[in-house]
Image (cartoon, coloured by chain):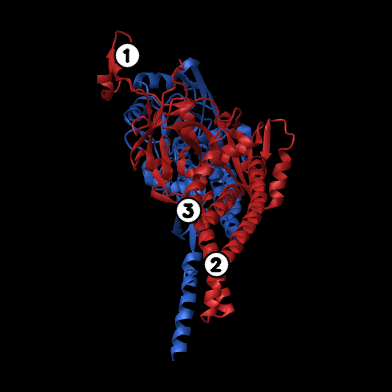
Chain colours: A red, B blue
Amino acid sequence: MILCLFLTAVLPITVSRLLSSFEKGIYARAAATPAVIGAQGSRLDLALQSLYFNRKLENTVPYSEFKRVVAIPEITAIPIHVHHTARGYPIVATNNDYFSFRSLRFMHGRPFGIIGECVVGASVAGALQLKLGHSLLSDRPDLLGLAGDYPLKMTVVGILAGRNSSDDGAVFVDLKTQWVIEGLGHGHQDLESEEQAENVKRESDRIVALPSKVVPYTEITPENLASFHFHGSLDDFPISAIIIEAQDVKQETILEAKYQNNQRGLQFIRPEESLETLLSTLFKVKRFVSVNTWLVGISTAMLTGLVMLLSLKLRQGEMETMFKIGCERKAIATIQITELGIILAVGLGLAIAFAILLDWFATRGLENWIAGQ
Amino acid sequence: MIRRTIFLVFVSLLALPLSGCSENQSRQQRTNDGSESAESKPIIAATNLALESMTKAIVGDFGEVIRPQVQPDPESGLNMDEVIRMQRAAVVFTNGPGANDAPWLNLISLNESRVHATTKDEFELSDFIQVRDFYTVHSHGDEGEHSHPWLVPHCWLNPRLAKAQSLSLLNRLIKSFPDQEALFRTNQKELIEELGEVEALAMEVAKLLGAGNLTVISSDPRLLFFTRSLKLEDNYFLWFDLPEPSVALKAIQQRKPDKGDTLLLWAGKGGSLKDHLKTSAGITMATVNLIEAVGDETDSATNYISKLSQNYQTIKMAVEGMND
């Protein structure tokens, strides 16, 4: 009987609870990201990338657009650029305002200070066994690419405390570090220096680097930092999105109006609204489960009632005996109600406990699954 | 008695969570790394001595003005403590792209919203100085050899432009700390008066130079903002890579007129070339402080305005000496 009640209750309770937790979680992150400016295209992709860093957007926004927005006093703007990965984890290029914007706490270390430094999320640090001072190589986007972009060897200077969000699984760098990874900026080695003597071959009129001494990655060190520079204007460099937080709705609306039907190929979105598209499918499932829960509940109640009636009929002789030996009818009814109460309480209690346990383990996984879609 | 004890325990338990709402908490501020730190004076960073000095004059005791000694060269490297302090600054004042005094800012993670270019809004396009006869020629990657004209960053050598920069500083400071507007305006007014006095001195020296019919040659283009403040034509003969003394001497001789006196303005510290020219060129020489840092040049002035004033006094004394 208990097992029957448990099995009947566990599915609707678990699904309902999981969906509620997920809804709360996903909306909390979306609600904490009031607006996003990005290139025109899929609004959902833009929202998912700025929230979960999982999409590579086809079109980008010039950095000058961020400078234009950040100059508005009533607006807080944070750039986001996600284009590469490091050991499979997304490299999120931003600035240090991002950490305070998301209320992220540093478990170890500090924010990135110069180009070539990175801050890793708790999951990344745990999975890759990273500690402060360790190095992390960016992944090559195309192993067969003839241009052969060299990966950047980054130094871990900060590890974030876990927040059970997509920030845990990201590698944060400064925008300029990302632009170095993309090949928009680079440094030079002084091949004539004494330190390079072992790595070069001097020919009559030139100095040639020995192939065996050429490292297959770029590293920014105190020795070569000064030689790093960017080609072209930083204003033209790409970013994926700009997270916007306005002081009030009026400012947000004024900014939104500026991006409506603009000729610069940009769009202004509210992630919460964009996620509705994704979540509406999920909530159709929730509605179905809700209806199903009622139907199953009614049938279970009827079945339980039937079983109880049959049980009472079967135990009628037992009850008569109890009455004859002096037990009051009221006491007999109390015993039967208590028995029923215990069965209901244990069955439903087990179902609720199971749902809570599953929710605790599964919420993160479900959010990741959504992020991965 | 028991009831009273229970009541006291109950009240104490209720008061426990409220104990966190102390005055200390309200005094805490959030830093950009998401951590909480005890409140102190707001940090304001400046990338050159002139901006540091003018900012100090405007904010008074309200804020702590820092000037990180960041030079990303292999020898001194980047001082990470200074970089982190600068990241925590409420505002970072710099010249701006037309007179870039801190190219190393590109190597540091700074939030764009806190960086304020002081030359951007207050300068006319004609105020910037582009050295067209010198290009930074270099070659890298697929672009091949290419060049960029050099823009002189030393705009602080001109008091008129310093006044414009002080206005830019004032506007940004008011935007960041609106409740201090009255203090900032009063202090900036005094600063403008001081710079006005230096500007008047510059006019006086310009008149002296004009009256003396002197030819003024400056050592290199870093002095262009200074010489233009004296209404002088651009006339320099060196670049940063010092030539052989004979080559430098020849360059001076070519610029020297047949008649009249010549005054050579030397940028910054001297050296063997300066000493050589002083004895062999037969011209009067005056050293102009580039006001790039404190203590790296031998002078008695201690702050930006006194250093700026001393530059004009040096020229004035040299011209008066020549007239005698």
**A190 relative to A252 in the view: left or right:** left
Q: Is A300 left or right of A148, judged from the image as shown?
A: right
Check disc 1 and report the residue beneath it. A207
> Are the residues under marks 1 and 2 on the same chain?
yes
Query: Is the C-beta separation of discs 3 and 1 under 8 Å?
Result: no
Q: Amino acid at mark 2?
A: Arg
Q: Nearer the viewer, residue A370 or A63?
A: A370
Front-lying residue, B175 or B111: B111
Cα separation between marks 2 and 3: 38 Å
- Write the residue at 44% across / 89% down: B2
On residue A357, which mark appears? 3
Callout 2–callout 3 Cβ contact below 8 Å:
no
Image quarter in which the C terminus of chain A is found: top right
Q: Which circle marks residue A306 in the picture?
A: none
* Most distant residue in the bottom direction: B1
Which quadrant of the figure has residue A274? top right
Q: Which residue is mark 2?
A: A315
Chain of the residue under label 1: A
Chain of residue at mark 3 = A
Q: Earlier in the sequence, mark 3 or mark 1?
A: 1
Foreground: disc 3 or disc 1: 3
Three-letter amino acid code at disc 3? Answer: Leu
Q: Residues within 10 Å of mark 3 (few under 14, many from 20)?
A: few
| Residue A326 location (% of width, % of height) | 52, 82
Along the line of sight, the residue nearer the viewer: A281 or A184: A281
- Using the image, name the chain to which the residue with label 2 belongs: A
Can you give x and y, in whole percent of width and height, for residue A358 in the image? 49, 50
SS label for mark 2: loop
- Label 1 sits on what residue type? Ile
Vertical comparison of B285 with B188: above or below:
above
User: Is the same chain shared between marks 3 and 1?
Assistant: yes
